[in-house]
Image: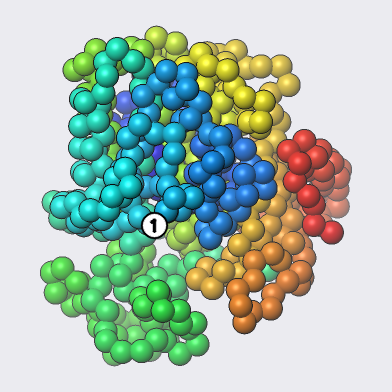
Amino acid sequence: MADDHAAKAISSYGGGLNDTPNIDRIAHEGVRFDHCYVTNSICTPSRAAILTGTYNHVNSVKTLDTHMDNDLPHVAKHLQTGGYQTAIVGKWHLGEGQLHEPKGFNFWSVLPGQGEYFDPFMIEMGTEREEFGYVTDIITSKCINWLNSRDESKPFFLMCHHKAPHREWEPHPKNRNLFGEDIKVPETFDDNYKNRAKAAAEAKMRIKDDMKYADLGLAQPEGGSEVGERVRPEMSHRKIPNPDDVSKLRLIDKDSGEVFTFKSKEELGQFKYQRYIKRYLRTIASIDESVGVLLDYLDDNELTENTLVIYTSDQGFFLGEHGWFDKRFMYEESLQMPFLARFPKKIAGAQISKNLACNVDFAPTFLDAAQLKIPTYMQGHSLMPIMNGKVPKNWQSVVYHRYWMHRDPDHNAYSHYGIRDQRYKLIYWYNEGYDLPGTNHGGEDREWELFDCKEDPLELFNVYSDPKYQDIVQNMKDMLTRKMAEIGDEPEH
Ligand code: CA
């Protein structure tokens, strides 16, 4: 698993942005899911859903600040009880200390919080120590070392969780010059956010306005915070200005010292996009290399046939679509998770599945693949039958998403919930639920959105009030009510 890896940045998904030959091997020799979705498009909650097989209102990990109780049952504990040797290496982000550190793993070595790209501290079996090198390489070699040291008479379960390509997108020095040519700009980069809920225009996730110096590998000038920017002690990074008059703006590459000047605001916006997307894709080059190392290990040790290998991310990510970076929203780019799986002994290769899947389905899938019982508390469903070409009767016809962190100070994304089926997406912006001290938001301007993802794949037109769609609106609302009742979440009135 990688952190924040959009499907579009894996070449087998056809995004045309980069080449990921090793990750693609999993798709070519296995199955690619085109409709796999996250139930809460943010790190910590998605990781809890993946481990426990439950939605966040059930496992109580609704936000980045509500860490997982490590006494909760989860998939690694069940696999361990079932005779598997278990390990997790890399990003955990479910909390630290006795109440939250990994449990259910024979070996664990995790980054505290988000982790650092270079010389990261890692907490290994309860002891913190500094590792030297580039984080993606370190995680990979720790995985290989653990595989080499395991008891070969027992089966194994390994979660290799990369920190990349999470902000601030620091590539390995050897990859700093990859992507010489400019990358294509998404057609919605200059979105004006018309015809949609207020949330889109209000989000502070714009590449042009909300990138920080560190995000783009630029030297940060000394001094205080920007005018109007909220200050928190842990957030010392400043946003790069986006002034109307750019003639005095000089930006400096923090590694090479190269100086950049601009003739227009337009040119500055393009510069920010290219810096962002290239740094993001360069970090993925190292992940692809890591996947190759692990696949080669399986080949060299005759483990390929009987091992289920999955490549995924904790959610999707905006790569300039609607002018954004980041995730959080139920719009397609952040809702979609890449999901590739290979298991030569059980799954035919070169498959593409259009069936709906979500992260709550992962834990049941792991247990099913291991031929262990799926506990009744898990709310997801095994994807193994689908990967075997046998779609169960009454397979899920909608997936559910809910984001609770209303107007967090960094991104100002509004809280919402909704469902997506194969064609339509219904979103209810209920706009309350996450208040920091000193703020008083809640319940203002509630709105609905309906998107026809077939007619409007870029999601530019909310057709909720369009007379032609009123039957669809009613049907989707009924399905939303049923889905919330099925999973036990409470609607906001
Ligand atoms: Ca993430």
* Residue found farthest to the top: 345
Residue 8 placement (x, y as % from top left):
42, 44
Q: Residue at x 61, y 77 (%)?
A: 437
Residue 353 placement (x, y as % from top left):
53, 25
Disc 1 target residue? 113
Q: Residue at x 42, y 18 (%)?
A: 83
Quarter of the rendering occupied by the C terminus? bottom right
Please name whichever residue, 89 or 96, is drawn nearer the observer in this view of the structure: 96
Identify whether 266 is placed above or below 274: below
Would residue 437 appear left or right of 220 to someone viewing this image?
right
Q: Residue at x 61, y 53 (%)?
A: 62
Q: Residue at x 36, y 24 (%)?
A: 85
Quarter of the rendering occupied by the N terminus? top left
Residue 43 placement (x, y as % from top left):
48, 51
Would residue 214 appear left or right of 313 to someone viewing this image?
left
Number of numbered discs overlaid on the protein picture: 1
Query: Few, some or many C-alpha atoms within 10 Å of disc 1 (few <14, some 14-19, many ≥20)?
Result: some
Identify whether 465 is placed above or below 437: above
User: In terms of secondary structure, where does tag 1 sit?
Assistant: loop
Q: Amino acid at mark 1?
A: Gly
Residue 138 picture quarter: top left
Query: Does residue 479 appear in the picture of this structure?
Result: no
The reply to whether the residue tagged 1 has its Cβ within 8 angstroms of ligand 1 is no
* Residue found farthest to the front: 98
